[in-house]
Image: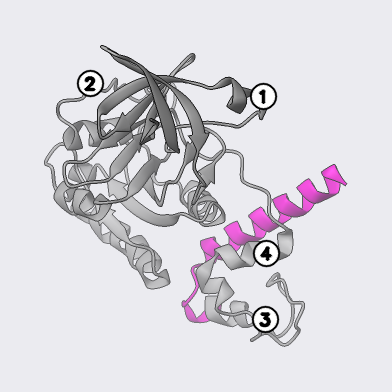
Amino acid sequence: MPITGRIIEEQKNFFVVDTPSGQVTATTSGGLKKQRTRVCTGDIVEVTIINTAPLRGVITTVGKRSSFIKRPALANCSHLFCICTWREPPLNLETLDRLLFCAQVYELQPCIVFNKIDLNTDKDDREMHKIINSYTAIGYPLFSTSAATHEGIDALVDFCADRISVCAGLSGVGKSTLLSVIFPDVNFRTGPLSSDSTRGIHTTTSIRLLPLRGGGYIADTPGLAFIDLPAVPEEDVVLYFPELAQCIGKCRFNDCIHDNEPGCFVAEKIEEGTIAPWRHNHYLKIRREMAERRKLYR
């Protein structure tokens, strides 16, 4: 009789499946291999047990996914925490906006986390909160955390309850260190910033889901930074910038792409300070990338 569980770790030759009977080490069935069905961490699967001590089985069925990230492969995630820092490494607003864009394309709820706030000076905090106010005005949930002092950790964990969340960000922003505070019994390999740059050293090598005591999981992923943006039609890029999407239909021309056209409502909002100019610049840059990608593949 097959049992249902969730894949919580993918290794080279097997999967670890979390089931009501315990964790099962499993391989995929010949039928799934013939169908070339991609099985990955986060999938809900049916497993036929072939050995009880230790628990081993064969995955025979993969359930329908609510979401899917291609690289590294992760299914059924609901929230993406975009981890950034103000000082070490310095805040990169373009990276943050690209992460937010990716989250929404993949149909994940994006959340922003400013980590390492213990390193901030009073001036840093004032400048950081100007940026925070810009993003909270758009509607993005936002947390400020410190692994060193544990500030903000409880609020972050409470938000993760009964969900599958994943953390992304540049190397060195403290993803593994944050996870080590949330999961003190799990060994994480963490590394310092590299000596020749402000970017850190990747320390996680395989993707796994870590169960929270209150229900839900947080994914420990290898260098998830979404360097490669998912492809969308360039005219749809505006839909993934919520404050720009609200301006659709309010410009003088229906085909306005918000790039210095006369009567552009977005330009008016930038002038009055309602829309952050860097957000608009990053929207235009991603739009151009999507247009070039379409021309390349055509």
Residue drawn at x 60%, y 67% as measured from the top left: 239
Q: Is residue 294 above or below residue 38?
A: below
* Tags 4 and 3 touching, CB below 8 Å: no
Residue named by callout 4:
236
N-term-proximal mark, 4 vs 2: 2
Which numbered mark, 1 or 4, is in the foreground of this view? Answer: 1
Identified by mark 3, the residue type is Cys
Residue named by callout 2:
187
Q: Is residue 189 above or below residue 112?
A: above
Please state the horizontal and vertical placement of residue 260, each as a whole percent of the image: 71, 73
Residue named by callout 1:
34
Residue named by callout 3:
264
Residue 289 is one of the magenta-drawn residues: yes
Q: CA distance from mark 3 to mark 2?
A: 53 Å
Identified by mark 2, the residue type is Asn
Please state the horizontal and vertical placement of residue 283, each as a whole percent of the image: 61, 60
Which numbered mark, 4 or 3, is in the foreground of this view? Answer: 4
The secondary element bearing badge 3 is classed as: loop
Q: Which residue is farthest left? A: 149
Magenta part of the protein: which range?
271-298
